[in-house]
Image: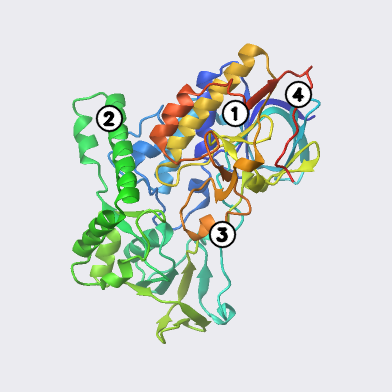
């Protein structure tokens, strides 16, 4: 073995950095290393470089619980988030723990040694094999090599530039040009006002169907005021608790009274558009939170539409032409640049090929115990954020639980833990829940599945998770522990 590692963290994004801090604070007896395939930290916030890239969650809940986001700005830009993560890395001395340019190719669990054997390739294509006692997957859930890019009819005929936001060209010149953005999700609604501000001639958002969009203030004025008479930490905790409560209340109201929430959202959009844009483009056919709710700061999207610098079309693409996009309605959209903001390609564990004793592991045949540990897979956990709240909230509670589990193992001399699943509990829905978004549907073949009951049922409820994971016991009959000199009486059931 080139390197022996205690806890191996795969990924130096939000999840990996947050987990590393929790381990360093709560499990000082445990050493850890972080493998990152890219040349810098930040994951999503290092990969995406398109104009206006920003969080779609407020920063009081997107920031970690151990480090206040010390600015009044509600939605932070990609560079600002990277700056925040850089502060975390420096403050907790993580830099020497991160191995950049190291891609994990495969990971095989050797049940006789109770260790993971991890094959790694560096930027020089040199392969190494590391061994690890525990593996923590912090890679998110999409493919960093390629986004979801459907093939459009005759797209090869288009003489302009066709771009996917995941691979934004450096120094793209779009000043004075006609831009068509295909999509209606968070990326599209961010790009429209940003490209207008950047000097685009005209920007058209082309969508198959509308999404719910809410306008929120760009500055948290309450946080700004409370910081003047509270300590930074207290003001942050207060704002964080308030926003978590509001998010949960809005989501719960949408589930219980969808018509009421729909009416409020649509009324808010109508007030923003001021009669300048047809409401049909912002009236979805589904209920609020059947798909993720999009937000815009200070109504910047609606302002661009009102002022005529941007427009929206709800239609389907018939084909690409040499100079734009032909719609099925008969309308033609002239374009110098077409941006395919069509979403993500789903991937688990960053594409790592996992196996147990050489037998391949299919993550879609597994569940997540407490939303954290992969069923029937020893000494492995993964962090997948919430669909209805900030990703970081899940990082904090999941990492804290993992630390408690590791401490329990150390206290009792255990070398292995496995959450034994039951095939009868396996459902068709993934851990992403019941959202109808396209990327959720595309995740069915790779995402771990929901279980019928606790602790296999993923609720996407932060407040419930925080309570459950903080108080969860380890002697529940599902978690099976063993020592290296013992041969555990178990067999993985759901690998294939």
Furthest residue in direction front, as rendered: 424
Question: In which quadrant of the rendered view does residue 173 lie?
Answer: bottom left
Residue 432, x across and y down, in percent: 51, 48
Q: Residues within 10 Å of mark 1 (few under 14, many from 20)?
A: few
How far apart in space, not on screen, are marks 1 and 2 (Cα)? 34 Å
Distance CA(mark 4)–CA(mark 3): 41 Å
Q: CA distance from mark 3 to mark 1?
A: 31 Å
Q: Earlier in the sequence, mark 3 or mark 2?
A: 3
Considering the numbered disc 2 on the image, is that residue within a helix, a strand or a loop?
Answer: helix
- Tell me the residue at 61%/51% (across/down): 347
Q: Residues at badges 3 and 2 in contact (C-beta under 8 Å)?
A: no
Which disc number belongs to residue 417? none
Horizontal and vertical percent for residue 387? 44, 47
The label number, if any, that marks residue 147 in the structure image: 3
Kindly identify which numbered label has been placed on residue 488: 4
Q: Residue at x 54, y 50 (%)?
A: 429
When asked about the image quadrant of residue 129, the answer is top right
**Nearer to us: label 4 or label 2:** 4
Residue 307 picture location, percent across and down: 23, 70
Which of discs 4 and 1 lies nearer the camera? The answer is 4
Image side of residue 261 versus residue 291, left or right: left
- Residue at the (50%, 31%) spot, across then down: 398
**Residue 96 disc label:** 1
Residue at image coords 30%, 72%: 280
Query: For the residue carrying disc 4, how many other residues have a C-alpha within 10 Å: few (<14), some (14-19), or many (20+)?
Result: some
Q: CA distance from mark 4 to mark 2?
A: 47 Å
Which class describes the residues within 10 Å of circle 3: few (<14), some (14-19), or many (20+)? Answer: some
Which residue, given by chain and number where applicable, does mark 2 sit on? 238
Quadrant of the image for the N terminus? top right
Q: Are marks 4 and 1 in contact (CB under 8 Å)?
A: no
């Amino acid at each position: 073995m080139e390197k022996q590692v205690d806890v191996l963290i795969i990924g130096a994004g939000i999840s990996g950095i947050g987990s590393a801090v929790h381990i360093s604070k709560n499990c000082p007896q445990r050493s850890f290393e972080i493998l990152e395939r890219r040349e810098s930290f930040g994951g999503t916030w290092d990969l995406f470089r398109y104009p206006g890239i920003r969080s779609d969650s407020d920063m009081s809940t997107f920031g970690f619980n151990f480090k206040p986001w010390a600015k009044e700005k509600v939605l932070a830009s990609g560079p600002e988030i990277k700056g925040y993560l850089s502060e975390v890395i420096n403050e907790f001395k993580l830099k020497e723990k991160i191995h950049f340019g190291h891609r994990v190719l495969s990971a095989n669990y050797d049940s006789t040694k109770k260790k993971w054997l991890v094959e790694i390739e560096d930027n020089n294509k040199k392969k190494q094999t590391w061994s690890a006692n525990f593996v923590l997957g912090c890679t998110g859930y999409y493919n960093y090599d390629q986004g979801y890019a459907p093939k459009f009819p005759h797209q090869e005929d288009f003489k302009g530039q066709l771009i996917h936001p995941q691979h934004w060209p450096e120094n793209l010149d779009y000043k004075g040009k006609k831009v068509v953005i295909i999509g209606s999700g968070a990326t599209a609604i961010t790009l429209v006002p940003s490209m207008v501000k950047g000097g685009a001639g005209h920007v058209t958002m082309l969508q198959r169907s509308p999404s719910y969009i809410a306008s929120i203030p760009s500055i948290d004025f309450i946080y700004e005021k409370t910081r003047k008479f509270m300590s930074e930490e207290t003001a942050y905790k207060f704002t964080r608790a308030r926003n978590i409560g509001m998010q949960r209340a809005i989501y719960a109201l949408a589930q219980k009274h969808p018509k009421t929430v729909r009416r409020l959202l649509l009324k808010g959009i109508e007030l923003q558009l001021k009669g300048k844009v047809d409401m049909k483009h912002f009236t979805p056919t589904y209920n609020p939170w059947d798909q993720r709710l999009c937000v815009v700061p200070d109504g910047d999207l609606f302002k661009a539409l009102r002022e005529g610098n941007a427009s929206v079309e709800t239609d389907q693409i018939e084909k690409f032409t040499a100079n734009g996009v032909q719609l099925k309605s008969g309308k033609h959209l002239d374009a110098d640049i077409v941006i395919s903001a069509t979403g993500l390609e789903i991937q688990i564990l960053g594409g790592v090929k996992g196996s147990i004793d050489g037998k391949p592991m299919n993550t879609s045949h597994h569940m997540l115990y407490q939303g954290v540990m992969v069923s029937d897979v020893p000494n492995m956990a993964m962090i997948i954020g919430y669909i209805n709240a900030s990703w970081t909230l899940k990082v904090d509670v999941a990492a804290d639980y993992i630390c408690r589990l590791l401490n329990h193992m150390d206290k009792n001399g255990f070398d292995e833990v496995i959450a034994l699943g039951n095939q009868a509990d396996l459902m068709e829905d993934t851990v992403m829940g019941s959202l109808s978004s396209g990327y959720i549907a595309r995740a069915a073949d790779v995402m771990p599945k929901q279980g019928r009951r606790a602790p296999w049922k993923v609720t996407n409820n932060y407040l419930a998770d925080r309570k459950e994971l903080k108080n969860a016991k380890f002697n529940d009959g599902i978690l099976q522990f063993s020592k290296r000199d013992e041969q555990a009486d178990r067999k993985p059931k759901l690998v294939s």
